[in-house]
Amino acid sequence: MLGLLIAGISGNFQQVHARILWSGETIYIRSNGDIDWRPSGASPPPISTPDRVHYDITGDITTTGYGIVVERDNIIINGNGHTIKGPENVVGIYLEGRNNVTVMRTTIREYHSGIGLIRSSEISILGNHLIENNYGIFMEVSSNNVISNIRIGVITTAESIIESSHEEAIYIHSSSGNTIKGSIIESNYRGILLSGSDGNIIKYNTLRNNGERGIIVGGSGNTIQGNTITANGAGIDVRSPGNTFLGNTIESNRDYGIRLSSSNSNTIAGNTIRGNGYGIYLTGSNGNNIHENNITNNGNGVYLSSSSGNRFWLNNFTNNNVQASATMEQNYWNASYPTGGNYWSDCRGTDVKKGPNQDQSGSDGIVDTPYSINPNNIDYLPRGLYFRTPITVPPMTPLLRIKVSISSLGAPATAPPGSSISVPMTIHYETLAPTHVLARITSGATEVWSYDFGSKDGTGDLSYTATFNAPSSPGSYTYRLEVGYGPSLSSFTVNDSRDFSIQVPIVAKVIIMNFAAPPTASAGSSVPVPVTVHYEIIGSTSVLVSICRWTNSYWDCVWGNPDSSVSRSGTGDLSYTATFNAPSSPGSYTYEIRACYQSAGRWDIMDRKTFQLQVSPPTSQATQTPTSTTQVPPQTSSTTQTQPPTSTQTQSSTPQPQTSSTTQTQPPTPTTQTQSPAPSPSPSQLPLSLDLTGLLLIAVVVMALIIAILLLRIRAKPPA
């Protein structure tokens, strides 16, 4: 959980709690996330989890065995300032073979080791108090862990002074890649001990009043940077090669500031070493580079014993009782010209010469006379002026004081243009010290919403609904919710973020203002229908006006506006004269005028109007006169043929649909009479639409006439 909850030094760790006290043997966080305890018959301990990830301690705990044994990875244990106390032969919080666990805000006291890590990695130990343990933190064969914002040793509170740890505050054995930073380690027997451990970083810590040593380095490739190491028995004790000591303040330590014992090829640069017994002490150490340090007011600035090949340059030796002393092994006290050697506050030479051999006329800031420590240790180019070291150690970057995460986010999928968008959210925070929880929503580089939840401390959840306006232009928009911490919204450190998209659709209104459809048309003729539509569009889209005919099973579109591909926006009217051919079969047909706009690749119908069209036979067929008065009208094979309108019917401009046979050949009867009274039609003039009863009557009459004629002929025939 590296980087999750790295914390700065908390100046006010204590909180007021309801002091729930639980006593038992041991608490277990099992691998499946369950909380177990011994003895099993004891009351449940004050530790809970809502999700098997976050474990909150809600009361003080006293154990007779291990405090908490962690068997699960990827979790956060938050002590919320409560205390775990136990015997001195076991461990307070024990992690073996674990990965990605955070232990925070817990006071652990009187165990053999406050926190024990064995073969564990990616462990964060943040904002804890470790008091009166033999070892504050014990780490073995563990890598890539972070120890930050802890305080180990004597703690002064409003209640009491608490005794120091008995051994090392932090003991790291055979472990690499660990970081210890931003912690206060005081009044222990020893501060930090690296044993056989390479590639670790110890930075920006305060180590003070530790009885023996502040830091002991046993291992290579370690970096000790930006620490304040004061009033210890000794400052830094180095026992291995290849380490770097950069920008530390090492002050008022009883024995020495930095000691190298049998340690080669280390770098000591940019440190302030002041008021110690020895500033820098080398014994049996060769080939180290020591430069740009301020070595001031020590009993002995630099002391070398049985050490050779070490290089000193651009250091300031100021007012030490003994500036430097060395046994007879040869060391080098200056770099090449014009960099030169070191500044010695007691060097009284002149500067009237220049050049590598100081034999040319002119001043160059280098004293013309070498500064001699002994015959094998001479600064041949002593600097005449105090050298202001160009080495600067950046201040400790603001360490994360809080972990803020997005628990839930509910953004709408769509929003009308310009409408108010509501985005409910839940934010979870875990803080080691009071700091502001912040949130903001951005769209690209534009911030559309932000909020400061105020100063928060501890652990909690925040629910809020952000509101902002949707864009006025349709389209798909991506937003990002960012949450984090900082002193204010203008100084925002992001911990977590989540993207979401909102579709702003096209908003269109298309209505049919008027149309004029003819009530009748001849079969196959061209039918004109003037139509006008009105549109109001936010965004840009196309408008389709179409006319479709119902075919008893689907709508068959017979016309569409030719400019339907034109993109339109704003407000306007469109007028067309739609033309289409009437069906070839007489009858009554239903048509629909549709007004549509294009949305997401489809046509959405906004308005529709229907009309009926009565289709009659072609004009030439309708006016044809029969040649025989005795012609029997043809009969149709359809039994579903309906009667056309009679002479007494009044046709409407929107008649109801009528069923018509495709075999119908006669036109409908005219709607008005031109003669009165009308002559009786001859049989050949009878309309085909007469019903069967009439035809039968005619047939009976005809047969009766034929029989009568035959009888008359028989009677009139003379006898043979």
Image (tube, rainbow, N blue to C red):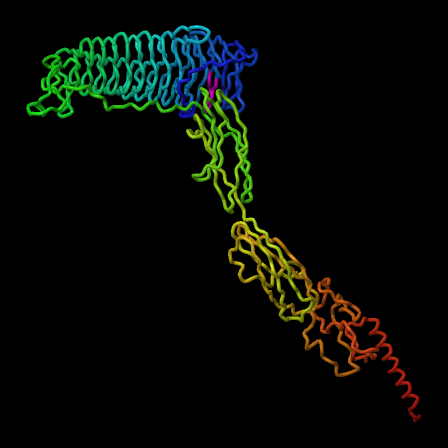
Q: Is residue 588 above or below residue 501?
A: below
Q: Position of residue 171 (x, y in %)?
A: 35, 14
Question: Is residue 46 left or right of 133 when viewed as pictured?
Answer: right
On screen, residue 662 versus residue 533, left or right, reads right
Quarter holding the C terminus?
bottom right
| Drawn side of residue 619 relative to residue 331, left or right | right
Residue 392 lies within the magenta run: no
What is the number of callouts on the image?
Answer: 0
* Residue displayed at 65% across by 70% down: 584
Residue 336 in the figure: left or right of residue 713:
left
Q: Based on the picture, tell me whether residue 71 belongs to the magenta stretch.
A: yes
Q: Quadrant of the N terminus?
A: top left
Judging depth in this view, the residue of 200 and 718 nearest the camera is 200
Q: Residue 40: which quarter of the image?
A: top right
* Residue 348 percent coordinates (x, y): 12, 14
Which SS type dominates the magenta stretch? strand
Residue 364 pos. (x, y %): 12, 24
The residue at the point 58 percent across, 55 percent down is 535
> Residue 165's spot in the image, x, y percent?
38, 8
* Magenta stretch bounds: 69-78
* Residue drawn at the location 30% of the way across and 20% of the way down: 225
